[in-house]
Amino acid sequence: MYLPDRAFTKDLKRIDKRLGVKFNGYNVVVTYDRGWGDPVNIWVVKGDQGGFRTPDRRDVEAIAASNIERESPEEKFQRVSKYYQKVREDVRRKSRENIRDMTKDSKIQLRQAVAKVENQSKANSTFRRIENKPKGQVFG
C-alpha cells in the first residue's frame, strides 16, 4: 500500500486539520472529514494521462486556492443568518399562500363547513341538482 509523503500530509493539515490522504488502489485521494460519516473525496491526484502521480506542491496550492473557508467569522455569521432569514420568510409566505389557495379553491366546501359548525341549515350540495319536472297538467 502506498503512503504519501509526510511533508505533503503536513501541508494539507496546515490548510485544514480535517483534510486527509488515502490511496484508492489507483490514485492518491485527498479527503475531507465532515465530522460525521466517512470522509468525503475532494481531490484526486492524477498524472497528465490520468494515471498515478505522486502528490506534490501543485496539489497543495490548488487545494489552498479552492478553500472556501477563508472568510471571517463575522462574514460567515452574516451569510448564514441571511440564509436562515430567507428560509423563514419563504416558509411564512408558503403557509400564507397555502391557506389562501385552500380557501380560494374550495369556496363551496368552506361554506358547507361554516354552515355545519354554526348549525344553520343543510349545506348546498356540490353536485348538480336535478329539478323534478312534473308530467301532465299542473294546477297551481
Image (cartoon, helix red, strand yellow):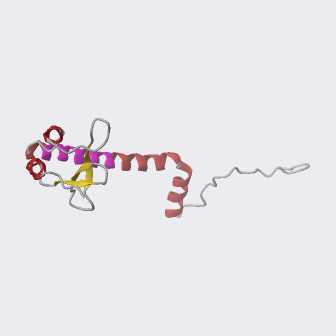
Q: Position of residue 140 (x, y in %)?
A: 82, 49
Q: Is residue 27 left or right of residue 58?
A: right
Q: Position of residue 117 (x, y in %)?
A: 49, 63
Q: Quadrant of the N terminus?
A: bottom left
Does the magenta-highlighted stretch encompass residue 115? Answer: no
Residue at the limit of the structure toward the top, as seen here: 48
Seen from the viewer's position, the closer of residues 93 and 41 is 41
Where 122 sits versus 134, above or below? below
Q: Is residue 131 left or right of residue 55?
A: right
Q: How many marks?
A: 0
Where 66 sits versus 130, above or below? above
Seen from the viewer's position, the closer of residues 124 and 58 is 58
Q: Residue at x 27, y 60 (%)?
A: 38
Q: Is residue 93 left or right of residue 61?
A: right
Seen from the viewer's position, the closer of residues 88 and 59 is 59
User: Which portion, as a residue range, is magenta?
Assistant: 76-92
Q: Residue at x 23, y 48 (%)?
A: 84
Does the magenta-highlighted stretch encompass residue 90? Answer: yes
Q: Position of residue 115 (x, y in %)?
A: 53, 59
Q: Position of residue 41 (x, y in %)?
A: 27, 51
Q: Residue at x 55, y 54 (%)?
A: 109
Where 35 sits versus 30, above or below? below
Q: Residue at x 12, y 48 (%)?
A: 8
Q: Is residue 129 left or right of residue 105?
A: right
Q: Main secondary structure of the magenta part?
A: helix
- Quarter of the image where one finds residue 48: top left
Seen from the viewer's position, the closer of residues 8 and 67 is 8
- Quarter of the image where one finds residue 61: top left
